[in-house]
Amino acid sequence: MEEKKLDINSVIGFLLIFGILMYMLWQNQPTPEELEAQEKAKQEQVEAEKKASEQSQTKITKAEDYTPGTASDSLQLVNLKNKLGVLAYSETLNSGNDETLVETDLFALKFNNRGGYLSEVKLKKFVDFNDEPIYIIKEDNASFNINFGTTESRIVNTKDRYFDPTVTKNGENTIVSMKLKVSESKFLEYRYELKNDEYMIDFTIRSQGFSDVINSSQAVNLDWNLKTYRHAKSISYENRYTEVVFEYEDGKDDYLGQQEQTDDTAEDVSYVAFKQHFFTSILLTDAPFKKGTFESKNLVQDEEVDTIYTKAFVAKLPLELAGGEINKTMDWYYGPSDYKILNAYDRNLDEIVPLGWGIFGWINKYLFIPLFGFLGGFLPYGIAIIVMTVLIKLLMSFVQYKQFLSQAKMKILKPELDAIRLKHKDNKMKAQQETMALQTKAGASPMAGCLPALVQLPVFYALFQFFPSAFDLRQKSFLWVKDLSSYDTIAELPFSIPFYGDHVSLFPILASIAIFFYMRLTTGQQMSAQPTQEGMPDMGKMMKYMMYFSPIMMLFFFNNYASGLSLYYFISNLISIGIILVIKNYILDEDKIHAQMQENKKKPKKQNKFQTKMQEMMEQAEKQKQAQQKKKR
């Protein structure tokens, strides 16, 4: 066997190779400049990776933050879930579009994808006093939100979450579906169905697969807020008819009123309306909300400064869960506060139009609205007001006749009544007994003049409610008036007069003049019929003051009111003056009335129960007085 020995040549070879490698490494080592550049590049890479990680943890609320199919897809979704919980999925589906646009014959609508609610409602058939389009909702003046707790102990406000929008057609109807998704099979949906020629929008809130998302032990609340836009020339006049109206407990209705700030609660709420004088927003429900809380705040402190909004409204309504899910069928109404349109829905929405309570509302609903609608169908609206006024005054002329006849009888009896008071000036009770006896025999009574005046009051008040609420008068012109639903202007003042305004309206001036002459006629007749008695001079002065005060009050009070109402009062008082002059000069004959009264005195007159009772009470009082006088003696 050959003995192995160390080969010196091999050793030398290995040493040479090692030396060559070491030389090559020494020759190729980086310079100080290259080392500095490498270190800087390394630091930049570390900082970039750190920044990317922070962004994926904190941002991801827009479409560009989540890019499916990229290497960071899974990481971003994990970070979203850490931040938003089960609602993270819906955020990843946002396409980047903030709004969904839909139009019908009546509406131009925008739906906010962030929140799923209507962010703009334009009524295409109407304009405001500046000929600008009517917007009920625009530029964040409204919000709609559902607030609930999740099983992950988070609080969710739907107005802050992205909804996945889809728009489809169902025949002529347009369906807008907004879904807040947990997954493709689990979501909270707002479903809107729009009919092409309807102001009422079918609205449903429903959830699917949310029973393991919503914490059923916590309340689920629906919040609806709206700041109402100004649409009329006079913001203070419009604000007077802007309010919250709600229906509760199976048909009852109420409103918050006109205070600076007010609130109220109600149970079993079936609708809530944010009324803006001639336009309104209404949320209706098929199954009543168990409770509703409503708030109203006046936003007009100075008409010269506060020119955009009138009031701020809030409604808070609880939503009930069924098996851990939401299923609520409702409706939205965005449109005119027109009695005919609202009443046609047969859901008690006519109560939103302030026509007056009780008999006043009945007169408007069953007499004035049908009559004015009929006349307005073939006459200009200004002429329709005049014709309706003539018809009403002719219908009420018998009341004026009775009133004037009673005053004429009292005027004829005045000398005899004065004689009775003079005869029994020391015994007022006896004077009153004989006065009543004479009036009964003659067939004259001061009450006969008061009762006809009372009959006219419901008509007067009903018309006072009718004209400011008549949507048909809106932007209808007549003579110099551009809008019968607003004040007319013949002159602009360079300053504002308290309680009067910064303009001069002609119809209130004409109405005030007519009222003055009407009161001059009626006051003179009343004063001549009043028997002379103590205190009468003061009464006469008061009636004279009223003759001047009433026209002045009319002038100031109606300067900012609807010119259609002032037109009515002007024509009404002109007709009243004419009727009084005809009755006085051509119908009533004081000589014949006097002769008839003398005949009445000769006939036995049977007293009614009221007169008999009054007579007995006065006789009893007289006996007690005489008894007291005897005791004193």
Image (cartoon, grey):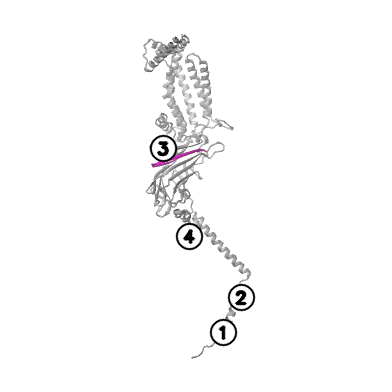
Q: Earlier in the sequence, mark 1 or mark 3?
A: 1
Query: How far is the residue under mark 1 from the one under mark 4?
Result: 57 Å
Q: Work out whether residue 140 or residue 382 is closer to the camera in this orientation and state it.
A: 140
Judged from the image, the secondary structure of the residue bearing numbered disc 4 is helix
The rendered magenta stretch, by its main secondary structure, is classed as strand
* Front: mark 2 or 3: 2
Task: Say which residue appears at 50% left-offset and 15% top-offset.
Answer: 536
Q: Earlier in the sequence, mark 4 or mark 3?
A: 4
Q: Which residues are magenta?
A: 280-298
Identify the residue under disc 2: 26
Q: Amino acid at mark 3?
A: Glu
Camera sees residue 325: yes
Q: Amino acid at mark 4?
A: Leu
| Magenta-span inclusion, residue 436 | no
Label 2, residues with CA under 10 Å away: few <14, some 14-19, many ≥20: few
Label 3, residues with CA under 10 Å away: few <14, some 14-19, many ≥20: many
